[in-house]
Image (cartoon, helix red, strand yellow):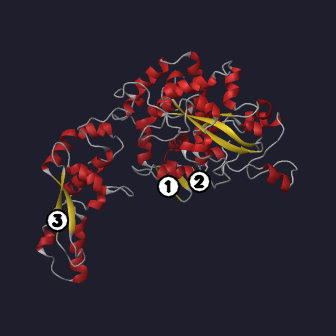
């Protein structure tokens, strides 16, 4: 349970104040085993009067100024209220993975257990936040929900132990020496330790919270044998979005009736509208189509997405088939089309982009310019000619007719992205400017003129030379 930020899960006793997010079953068991000294949140269970609630309700968790928050036990340990941690004494030039491996290898068994336990609560909190976000609920910032309460300094007979301490006690590793273990992890840059106070019915009590650093999380994941990426790789989707994609893929061209078709069994209806929005509002284009009113299906882009990334998703989400089978009676289908650019797994998907190739946004911008040149199109020129002939009934100036093929700068990027950085990178390419700007003459409609983005000989040569590499690197982009 997170106190403050409008978050509350059921009732909370003082014994639960220090607990991190675990399963609901464990929370209910803990609450039933202790007297309800305190309830937090908008719902109060039991027969307490309004006056009693007012006396018992604590204020939202609040930070105390640094000069007041340093407890005597923290001062003796040589720590400060500043939660920042020193840098790990590892080679700064090494990769995060190699630094994580070295950090884990440098820990003893007790330190590894503490780090792994903190990771468990960190991942549980992340799962809770993702679930809340999927329900379109407001969530606190990561700097808050990643804080794991390690201890509240009060007699154990009154407050019990935090969930972290309970797990460590079950494993026989919670004793008076725990402070030195936290200090060792902090000194290595694997965790941050925050000392503050929390207001309770017993008054203002000292509290210790810990949070994994990026290096600490990587080290703990390495120790736990977790090889899947910590975050969804760029271009891939979350678990539930993939479930929706697979269901629509399996439904074929006929699609699925939307969620309001209550006469149709749930498993035969399309995913919820919130999930469909995630498939529709992708930066590289929509993955779904509405075949007819109330019937949803995958677009050709959506089917191609699965054909390319099926192996990636099955590796990223090993439980995908189990979830599909249990909930919807299907399994992940084999790609209907075997593509040369299909990825064989995550290693293929996450391959580093060669330095001489463009990032996807810049490549799309260059492709738009080259496509306009290939098709002899220029929106600005065509609009101006039509404007003179049909609106103003005047001869088209020669300067307008002489405008070359190209695109206006605003067409280089999809909103809300800005075209200026893309244009700057294309003009500053190490191999020579790939595009250039051509001045546009003022017209009756565009009194200030403007500029047009056109391809340079270096841009045409660059694309012709690396077109096949780009198709392999960005298989989902529509390239000329």
Which element type, helix, strand or loop, lies under badge 2?
Answer: loop
Quarter of the view holding residue 152: top right
Name the one closer to the observer, 256 or 99: 99
Q: Indicate whether 116 appears above or below 260.
A: above
Residue 443 in sight from this viewpoint: yes
- Residue 309: x %, y % from top left: 43, 36
Q: Nearer the viewer, mark 2 or mark 1?
A: 2
- Gap in angstroms between the C-alphas marked 1 and 3: 44 Å
Q: Nearer the viewer, mark 2 or mark 3?
A: 3
Residue 226 in sight from this viewpoint: no
- Specify the label residue 291 is tagged with: 1
Write the residue at 20% across / 45% down.
429
Name the one closer to the observer, 428 or 336: 428
Mark 2 vs mark 1: which is more N-terminal?
2
Which element type, helix, strand or loop, lies under badge 1?
Answer: strand
Q: Are marks 2 and 3 in contact (CB under 8 Å)?
A: no
Name the one closer to the observer, 294 or 110: 110
Write the residue at 48% across / 29% down.
189
Mark 2 vs mark 3: which is more N-terminal?
2
């Amino acid at each position: 349970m997170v106190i403050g930020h409008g978050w509350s899960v059921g009732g909370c006793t003082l014994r639960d104040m220090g607990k991190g997010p675990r399963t609901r079953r464990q929370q209910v068991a803990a609450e039933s085993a202790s007297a309800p000294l305190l309830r937090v949140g908008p719902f109060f269970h039991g027969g307490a009067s309004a006056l009693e609630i007012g006396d018992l309700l604590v204020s939202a968790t609040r930070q105390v100024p640094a000069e007041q928050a340093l407890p005597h036990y923290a001062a003796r340990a040589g720590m400060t209220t500043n939660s920042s941690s020193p840098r790990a004494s590892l080679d700064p030039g090494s990769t995060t993975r190699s630094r994580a491996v070295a950090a884990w290898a440098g820990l003893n068994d007790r330190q590894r257990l503490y780090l792994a336990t903190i990771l468990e609560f960190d991942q549980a909190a992340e799962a809770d936040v993702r679930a809340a976000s999927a329900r379109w609920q407001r969530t606190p910032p990561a700097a808050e929900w990643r804080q794991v309460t390690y201890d509240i300094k009060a007699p154990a007979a009154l407050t019990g132990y935090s969930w972290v301490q309970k797990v460590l006690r079950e494993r026989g590793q919670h004793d008076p020496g725990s402070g030195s273990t936290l200090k060792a992890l902090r000194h290595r840059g694997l965790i941050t330790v925050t000392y503050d106070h929390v207001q309770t019915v017993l008054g203002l009590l000292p509290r210790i919270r810990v949070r994994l650093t990026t290096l600490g999380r990587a080290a703990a994941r390495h120790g736990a044998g977790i090889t899947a990426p910590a975050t969804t790789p760029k271009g891939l989707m979350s678990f539930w979005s993939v479930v929706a994609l697979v269901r629509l893929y399996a439904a074929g061209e006929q699609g699925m009736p939307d969620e309001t078709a209550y006469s149709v069994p749930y498993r035969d209806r399309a995913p919820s509208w919130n999930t469909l929005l995630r498939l529709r509002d992708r930066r590289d284009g929509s993955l779904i189509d509405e075949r007819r009113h109330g019937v949803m299906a995958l677009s050709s882009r959506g089917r191609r997405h699965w054909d390319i990334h099926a192996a990636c998703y099955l590796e990223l989400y090993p439980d995908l088939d189990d979830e599909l089978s249990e909930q919807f009676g299907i399994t992940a289908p084999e790609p209907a089309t075997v593509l040369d650019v299909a990825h064989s797994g995550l290693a293929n998907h996450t391959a580093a982009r060669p330095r001489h190739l463009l990032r996807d946004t810049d490549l799309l911008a260059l492709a738009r310019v080259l496509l306009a040149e290939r098709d002899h199109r220029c929106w600005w020129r065509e609009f101006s000619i039509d404007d003179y002939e049909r609106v103003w009934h005047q001869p088209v100036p020669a300067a307008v007719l002489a405008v070359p093929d190209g695109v206006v700068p605003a067409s280089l990027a999809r909103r809300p992205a800005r075209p200026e950085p893309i244009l700057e990178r294309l003009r500053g390419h190490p191999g020579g400017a790939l595009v250039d700007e051509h001045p546009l003459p003022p017209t009756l409609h565009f009194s200030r003129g403007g500029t047009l983005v056109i391809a340079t000989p270096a841009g045409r040569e660059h694309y012709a030379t690396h077109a096949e590499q780009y198709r392999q690197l960005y298989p989902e982009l529509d390239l000329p």
